[in-house]
Image (tube, grey):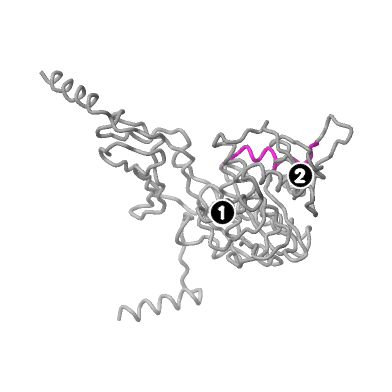
Amino acid sequence: MKKCLIAVLALCILLGVLSPVSVFAEEKGQKPGSAAPDLASQARSAILMDAGTGTVIYEKNSHDKLPPASITKIMTMLLTVEAIDGGTLKLTDKVRTSEYAASMGGSQIFLEPGEEMTVDDMLKGIAMASGNDASVAMAEKLAGSESAFVDLMNKRAEELGLKDTHFANCNGLPTKDHYSSAHDIAVMSRELLKHPQIIKYTGSYQDYLRKDTPKPFWLVNTNKLVRFYTGADGLKTGYTSEAKFCLSATASKDGLRAIAVVLGEPNTKTRNSEVSGMFDYLFSQYKVHTIHKTGDTLGTLKIEKGVKRELPIVAQENYTLLLKKGIAQEGIRHETVILDKVKAPIAKGQTIGKLVVYQGTTVVKEYELKAPEAVAKAGWWKLFKRTTGSMFSMG
């Protein structure tokens, strides 16, 4: 009887008699994009994602493995800014151009063998002009060779859980066994946007390289949306005869940041039009509900046998929900659950609790809370003094 009831309900949903409706959008589980119109009818593959929560609003063949062309450079830029934030690379560091890097065809900034540019200028050349030569020069700077850098790209893709991606070079020039998907590109784009300094490069419409030299090079962003769509500030275009016209774009409005990826578009006009429509749909239909802002105090972690007895826990990012406009959102509440008396040592980034968001009694979202710093185990003498001190204070 129970199986029959489930079958009937499933049939009703398929026929449109019943429709599962939610006032919130969840990163995993129910997809709010199921009722979205066909926003990218001309694209071979596409996805629309809310960058804040990772919620997928719309997707079309989003896991198809396709040539990504120069969108490949999103991973190249990601590894570069991660090295900068990690302290192993500086924007002022000089990058020398090898014969191999200078030999790259396609889009380029016409680097000469032996020419040196700063990391800052190389990032401009990659983000704005889609420089294949700049990408290889940067790869060689970071890993010693392009092949070693490609190994790092594939390792990072694995860490991000990208199942549809394999890199064979750092710039997206056509080659065997080099592919990705709209879904995976959206995920790596979201990761890149966690480094907001990248917007300085991807969001600029024009700039110069070699400005104070006899041969200044005028840069114009290959992504025209940064000029013609209000709020657009990235990320990367791509084109080869095999991949057709591709774009991973981002725009922000009213506290929302959208990521739209299209692969295999027939021309630039259609590509830009469909991505603009995807942005319009997200901004008109959804809104963001902030649970906590970065830096908000969430609670205190009690630590046993640590050099510190407790550790303040603050929000490491904005904790938000994506909500559908025009639907009441009663009963949304949240609870911070921090582990009780964790024993030292504690590693930086170690999970120490979670932020649980409810609608009524239903869990709609969970965020992991991580230790903001490492806490070493206290030595025996410190623990002895702490114990004896508490004994005497009791008297």
Question: What residue is drawn where x is 74% and y is 49%?
Answer: 225
- The residue beneath circle 2 is 227
Q: Position of residue 311 (x, y in %)?
A: 34, 31
Residue 363 occupies which quadrant of the picture? bottom left
Please tell me whether residue 348 belongs to the stretch shown in magenta: no
Residue 37 occupies which quadrant of the picture? bottom right
Secondary structure found at label 1:
helix
* 10 Å crowding of disc 1: few (<14), some (14-19), many (20+): many
| Near-viewer residue (324 or 120) | 120
Q: Amino acid at mark 2?
A: Arg
How many marks do you count on the picture?
2
**Is the C terminus in the top left, top right, bottom left or bottom right quadrant?**
top left
Q: Which residues are magenta?
A: 195-209
Q: Amino acid at mark 1?
A: Val
Left or right placement of residue 326 versus residue 143 in this view: left
Left or right placement of residue 44 versus residue 317 in this view: right
| Near-viewer residue (116 or 192) | 116
Is residue 132 placed above or below 214 in the rendered structure?
below
Is residue 129 placed above or below 260 in the rendered structure?
above
**Is the N terminus in the top left, top right, bottom left or bottom right quadrant?**
bottom left
Which circle's residue, 1 or 2, is located before the other in the chain?
1
| Near-viewer residue (270 or 328) | 270
Residue 187 is labelled as 1
User: Residue most toward the left?
Assistant: 395
Task: Nearest to the eye among marks 1 and 2: give it.
Answer: 1
Residue 299 occupies which quadrant of the picture? top left
Q: Position of residue 291 (x, y in %)?
A: 44, 42
Question: What residue is drawn where x is 76% and y is 36%?
Answer: 116
